[in-house]
Image (cartoon, coloured by chain):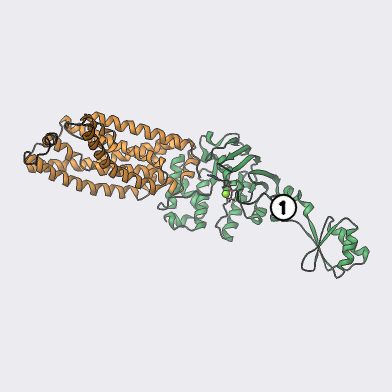
Chain colours: A green, B orange
Amino acid sequence: MSDGQIVVSGLTKHYRNVRAVDNLSFTVEPGRVTGFLGPNGAGKTTTLRMILNLVTPTAGAATIGGQRYADLAEPLRHVGAVLEASSAHKGRTGLNHLRVVAAGAGLPRQRADEVLAMVGLTPAAKRKFKGYSLGMRQRLGIATAMLGDPKVLILDEPANGLDPEGIRWMRDFLKSLAAQGRTVLVSSHLLSEMQLLADDLVIIAAGQLITQGPVDEVMGSMSGNTQVRVRTPQAEALTGVLAAQQATVTPGGDGALLVTGVDAPTVGRAALTAGVELHELTTERPDLERVFLDLTAGKAGIR
Amino acid sequence: MRLVRAELLKIRTTNAWWLFGLGALVMLALAFLVNAVNAIQLLNNPEDVPAMSPEQAEQVRAQADVVFQAANLYTSGQFFGLLFVMLLGIVVVTNEFYHQTATTTFLATPRRTAVVLAKLVTAALFGAVFWLVTTALTIPSTMIFFAVKDFDNHFGDWEITRALLLNLLAYVLWGIFGVGFGVLIRSQIGATITAVVLYLLGTTAASIIFTLLRVWLDAEWISELQVIVPSIASQLMITGTELPGSPPQWVGAAVLIGYAVVTGTIGTLIVRRRDIG
Ligand SMILES: Nc1ncnc2c1ncn2[C@@H]1O[C@H](COP(=O)(O)OP(=O)(O)OP(=O)(O)O)[C@@H](O)[C@H]1O
Ligand SMILES: [Mg+2]
């Protein structure tokens, strides 16, 4: 498998009375971290499980490097996955857990020790899984995914339960994997974290694709939402001038004004021309959270 | 093959196998004791039993045979041994759901039929090991016991060898039942309790029902039908001599193989279709 591209086409899953995933299509490129976003119940987990042949789609298909997961001869050597509701036997040690998986996948036994060291769990190697903290469990999950040194990584909410240190470790780890040319698809709720981590975004809601593309593009498509924050003792005068320029001015609550429709230089020039005194002038780009909430507005909510 | 190795490793890296093994050994000791007491009773005073109906008297006479008692002793512990083997088979499957390792297992091997086959083979192997250990204990014990009591131990007789081999078959097949059962009832506690209750109560209940039916319909052949109950079929397989009112041993084997094929196939089909997660 030369290419680790993931192609999802027309993927659909109906449960008894929910369309968990509805004709969803997107692609995930190698060498980049792709963030997979959507409100609770959007169908992220279902989609990832369908890509991995754990859930049978009602319609559509997904391929990894051109092949369906079920057709991969040695899947763990191509794809590593960390999923929700995936765990280890409580009474088995972390090292033994990895050895069992390695044995089943036909991977050399010492890979278990190697990946354990990679995630920093070597000190807990001989401890039973039930004694692991949430963060340790996530790390063991990542170690399991890395057993076959895969070209493609798929992670469902990997940051769950990690402390700030752990989240940072995870971010650096995933970025380094992408930098090595691997494909990294990661779902998350932590939007600020995604903004730091992802190169590309796939946003879904109610089982349907909302938008897909590089982070800048997705954010840029919402640049109409960029606003300028100004503070002035002559609020009325400024509002008058800006209204003439087709700008919308709303009170910002704390005495500032929020201006949309024009950029900061325009506001500054207008103020100068009108002789209005300014105390603050800043451009406020929408953050991912704003974009996300705007994009999925009305489609969020538990189904 | 590597999947079977992985399954064996799964069992070896947890506590279940030696807990079940220990349970089986304790029950084996008890069963041997009971059987030995029974044997002394029947072999020493065959006529000294309170006679009931003519058929029952005939049954008792048949059991007062040395070969029958020898086979019974050599295969001591089967009743609970089979139960433990079935429980192990159940655990081999339900562990994957109880501990949420099914995802990892099926990610490593998307060909689910292969996974189920490996589990069937593993459970069957464990059944064989249980048989080996129990038989290795009962053979010398029986020989010593018979030597002390001055009976011929009949070891090497075809009837005895047949009982021992069919007993092995029973152990293997009950491992397979366990896997099938675990697939049907995914909940570990649910599957275990249902299996134990069915095994213990079901055997007795079936005997009672068949007896009632026989009396009611006044037909002898009804009691031969009992063999369709798996645990009764297993007991039939290990009798050394043919008992009046029971079908020949091979019928028990055929019934059990039938059940094993059905449970194994249904289990495989279900796992192939099921969504994981
Ligand atoms: N096995 C199932 N049976 C019935 N409905 C299901 C099943 N699995 C998921 N669903 C439904 O499908 C929808 C999508 O669920 P999914 O778990 O894929 O969402 P998600 O995006 O991962 O949500 P979250 O962010 O909360 O993890 C939900 O409405 C859920 O109730
Ligand atoms: Mg989810």
Q: Is residue B249 left or right of residue A275?
A: left
Q: Is residue A102 left or right of residue A15?
A: left
Q: Quadrant of residue B257?
A: top left
At x 58%, y 34%, the residue is A67
At x 58%, y 56%, the residue is A169
**Residue A12: x and y, percent?**
60, 38
Q: Quadrant of residue B63?
A: top left
Of the pair A122 and A206, the residue shown nearer to us: A206
Q: Which residue is mark 1?
A: A294
The secondary element bearing badge 1 is classed as helix
**Residue A125: x and y, percent?**
44, 54
Indicate whether A131 appears above or below B261: below
Q: Amino acid at mark 1?
A: Asp
| Residue B164 makes an appearance in the image | no
Indicate whether A235 appears above or below A108: below
Chain on which label 1 sits: A
